[in-house]
Amino acid sequence: DAGVIQSPRHEVTEMGQEVTLRCKPISGHNSLFWYRQTMMRGLELLIYFNNNVPIDDSGMPEDRFSAKMPNASFSTLKIQPSEPRDSAVYFCASSTSGPGAFFGQGTRLTVV
Amino acid sequence: DQQVKQNSPSLSVQEGRISILNCDYTNSMFDYFLWYKKYPAEGPTFLISISSIKDKNEDGRFTVFLNKSAKHLSLHIVPSQPGDSAVYFCAASYSGGGADGLTFGKGTHLIIQP
């Protein structure tokens, strides 16, 4: 298996633009997580899905952030409109019932 | 308010010696603890975990110790090798670390010196 696949790896966008980050979880994994890493706050859980259903989105910072999981093999995290303070590395991870989650390589987002 | 704390941003250890990384938590509801390792430009990779019903778990050179009364856990790496140089994250979970999200510490950058 190729692991968790995220795209793009790097994204540079102007303030106010819409940004969409994509994630393909490991086949057979029924939980999917979106995390954000910043210097100030470290790794934070934004939202997670179980069996494609959003379970907890309390970590989503603002209404500008939204996430979807239309099927078991794809999820998106959208920021609209983007702001400079959204600049961070965004990780997607997936897991089964066992301990731990498998992370993708992340998307480095820069909003200028 | 941080529920998982790693108070040492960095740690330098000589190759062959023992590396000890520490982690404290505040929420007594956590029932599973994990350590992740992260290299630059890569995602975190799962290293080792421990359930709250145990006080020690060992996997090769890596051992995690849990002291529930002190709400403290530590990761021991012995002997330390150059490839161990990375950022190590402590994480905690309410549900065995699988279905629910993880709460992470800010990480400790371990540097193994030759």
Image (cartoon, rainbow, N blue to C red):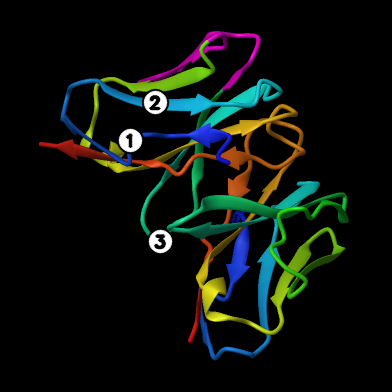
Q: Where is residue B64 drawn, in percent x and y?
A: 46, 18
Q: Which residues are magenta?
A: B50-69
Residue B82 appears in the picture as rendered? yes
Which kind of residue does numbered mark 3 sit on?
A: Ala
> In this orientation, which residue lies closer to the viewer: A107 or A26?
A107
Relative vertical location of residue A42 with respect to residue B56 in this rendering, above or below: below
Give the residue drawn at x 64%, y 15%: B52
User: Mark on residue B8?
Assistant: 1
Between tags 3 and 2, which lies in front?
2
Which kind of residue does numbered mark 1 sit on?
A: Ser
Instruction: Choose top left, top right, bottom left or bottom right for residue A54.
Output: bottom right
Badge 3 element: loop
Relative vertical location of residue A59 with respect to residue B73 in this rendering, above or below: below
Mark 1 packing: few (<14 Cα in 10 Å), some, or many (20+)?
Answer: some
Instruction: Choose top left, top right, bottom left or bottom right for residue B87.
Output: top left
Mark 2 packing: few (<14 Cα in 10 Å), some, or many (20+)?
Answer: many
Asked if the stretch drawn in magenta spans residue B52, the answer is yes
Instruction: Choose top left, top right, bottom left or bottom right for residue B28.
Output: top right
User: Mark on residue B22?
Assistant: 2
Q: Where is residue A58 drawn, in percent x and y?
A: 77, 53
Badge 2 element: strand
Query: Of label 1 and label 3, which has the lower sequence position?
Result: 1
Residue A28 appears in the picture as rendered? no
Relative vertical location of residue A28 with respect to residue A79 in this rendering, above or below: above
Give the residue drawn at x 49%, y 47%: B44
Asked if the stretch drawn in magenta spans residue B59, the answer is yes
Q: Where is residue B21 drawn, in percent x and y?
A: 35, 27
> In this orientation, which residue lies closer to the viewer: A40 or B11?
A40
Q: Chain of mark 2?
A: B
Which kind of residue does numbered mark 2 sit on?
A: Asn
Distance CA(mark 3)–CA(mark 2)? 24 Å
Which residue is the site of mark 3? B41
